Amino acid sequence: MKLIITCLYFFSGLQYNRKKFYILEYEGGIHLEDLNQLIADNLKEIRRSKALSLEQTSSLTSISKSMLSQLERGEVNPTISTVYKLSLGLKVPVTAFTAPKPTPFSQTSKAEVSPLVSDDGRYRLYPVFSFRDGQDFEIFDFEFDEGGQMAGNRQMAGTREFITVYSGQLTLIFKDREYVLEAGDSAAYNAFDDYIYKNTGKGMITACIVVHYPN
């Protein structure tokens, strides 16, 4: 796995590893962003842009007002389930809550990225570039251990995923059809359909995923 800043998002059974990441400012300085505070700031901005009160946001997301207040103050460590509720209720990609403010130049080290990890630890997703205004795609690097399987959550209509496998054998399962990808293979598919990722080879899969959202 060789790419960097979160599949936060689309997959069931994922949660944050408590780490921090760096954003390299244009002037050359390094600014350390805490993930909780980043989510807090983005949540406040998204809510403001939609002119929603805490009560309205609570109704849309099924998250209590008190929890929303804590989230906006950066006082709690949100689970992927909580962020996914925010995403669905506010109709934005999950990574809209994790994207730092854009700078003329940014650089991320994988060692400092907060990956999303499946409950069994076999699936690790590293967001390289996250969704933000004016950028309707995301790039993720991921590792998938031998024998692992992960069901994708259906995304908004029109969302497409593009995947390139670097190593291993990945089988994509769509209802009654299966597609096997080997190292060097690429594929594109609808991310709003039901599908499953499965490691059907020997050893770990490494791959890059690009997610493109409809305008």
Image: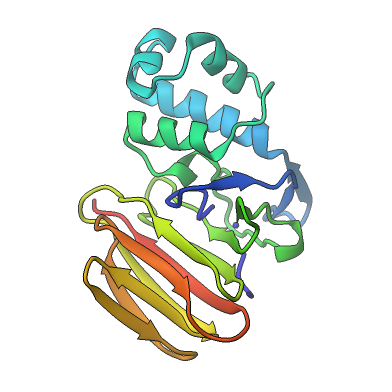
* Residue found at x 41% / y 75%: 163
In the rendered view, would you say 49 is above or below 21?
Answer: above
Residue 178's spot in the image, x, y percent? 29, 78
Residue 48's spot in the image, x, y percent? 42, 21
User: Of residues 2 and 45, which is closer to you in this image?
Assistant: 2
Residue 76 appears in the picture as rendered: yes
User: Of residues 31 and 95, which is closer to you in this image?
Assistant: 95
User: Of residues 104 and 95, which is closer to you in this image?
Assistant: 95
Q: Quadrant of the N terminus?
A: bottom right
Residue 73 is left or right of residue 187, and the answer is right
Residue 143's spot in the image, x, y percent? 60, 70
* Residue found at x 36% / y 72%: 162
Q: What colouring style does the render use?
A: rainbow
Residue 198 is left or right of residue 70, and the answer is left
Residue 116's spot in the image, x, y percent? 60, 52
In the rendered view, would you say 155 is above or below 208?
Answer: above
Residue 138 appears in the picture as rendered: no
Residue 4 is left or right of residue 54, and the answer is right
In the rendered view, would you say 87 is above or below 61?
Answer: below
- Residue 142 picture quarter: bottom right
* Residue found at x 63% / y 59%: 106
- Residue 126 picture quarter: bottom right
In the rendered view, would you say 182 is above or below 72?
Answer: below
* Residue found at x 30% / y 50%: 155
Total number of numbered discs in the rendering: 0
